[in-house]
Amino acid sequence: MRWLSRAGDGDRVPGVADIALAIGLAGYVVFDALTSGTWPEPRGVSALLGGSAAVALAWRRIYPVGSAVACLALLSSVALFVGPFQAGSSVIVALMAVWSAAAHGRRPWVTVSAVLCFAAAMGAGALWPGGVYSAAWVLIVLALPLGGGLTLRRLRRRQQDLEESSRAAEQAHEAAIAQERLRIARELHDIISHGLGFMVLQAGVADRLLKEQPEQAREALASIRRSGAEAVDELGRLLSLVRAEPEASREPQPTLADIERLASEARATGLDVLVERRGNLGAASPAVELNAYRVVQEGLTNAAKHAPGAPVRIVLTQTPTFVQVEVTHTAGSRGRPAEMRSTHLGLAGLRERVALFGGDFDAGAEPDGGWHLRATFPIELA
């Protein structure tokens, strides 16, 4: 029966330490039964049954419940068929058997039942009213290892549950980052494809104008140089994410110019969205604008999910050295803090995006109970 064995234990042979312990304890029991008056007559039978009970402890780690049942059954046989006894060596054997079964066994109720049967056998082997005292004494003595073992088993199970939950959360976090990396790779793939196509067109224009209009040809070549440099940068980011070829998309990738359209879609869902622009937008690379757009998109999604009806403020800031997007909203019409109630997998993806460009990302609660997302992307100057 599988419930007699220890959960997750694949060994079927006792360890050296358990064998040595069982043999040593069995020798002590046999010596005690043959030389002292605490075991009943005939002493040879008591020594045989008591020593066998101690030998059963060799399997206390592999079959803790089975070992305890066998051990208590052999000791009960001494009380029922040989005579009542109160040997100290038998107490040690019973304590160890009950502790091992309670701490490591699959079915605690079997261990409890075995203890009750053992107490009843010890009481039945004695005369009235001594049998009642003997049964009560057995229950009192074995209550400590039984309770302690069950408590340890419960704490160990709780620790295992916490570790499994932690591993599951870590795996989900890694899976979310991997999916976000694939999505970023597809987007960068589209940007690189567009840039290379533009370079091919500009090269054709430069070839036609090289002799007749050299100034315009030089402008076309300069445009090719800029587009090529951007394509090389984006290609390096793409290769740092994945090696497999991503699936290309036929739709144009969004930029910061599409933020207003995104805000209009959010207003249609009931959000009160205000867009504020600071600085001269439009000088950043397409990849930076795309990922800044994704930050705003995630912020609006979070606001619609956790703070419906709340005022949302989008701030787009650009200087010669960086582009910053910020999305903030209050607690919402439900009157509760508009925090991220999910597993923060969306935040993990955003951090991955921003870190790819060497930027800074911050997300957290506002003093009024709202939430903010802020991402800053550096601009590489030519």
Image (cartoon, grey):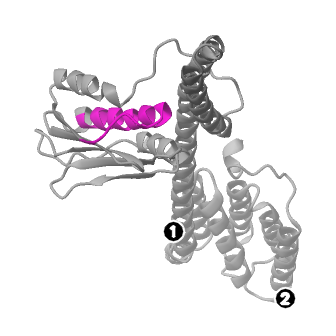
- Residue at label 1? 147
* Residue 127 position in % (x across, y down): 57, 74
Residue at image x 75%, y 78%? 40
* Residue 233 position in % (x across, y down): 61, 38
Label the magenta part by its dominant secondary structure: helix
Residue 292 drawn in magenta: yes
The reply, left or right, for residue 331 in relation to residue 186 is left
Residue at image x 53%, y 51%? 166
The reply, left or right, for residue 340 in relation to residue 105 is left
Who comes first in sequence, dot 1 or dot 2? 2
* Residue 108 position in % (x across, y down): 56, 55
The N terminus: image quadrant: top right
Q: CA distance from mark 1 to mark 2?
A: 33 Å
- Residue at label 2? 35
The reply, left or right, for residue 88 in relation to residue 226 is right
Q: Secondary structure at mark 1?
A: helix
Residue at image x 82%, y 52%? 11
The residue nearer to you, when weighing 357 against 181, is 357
Q: Label 2 amino acid?
A: Thr
Q: Label 1 amino acid?
A: Gly
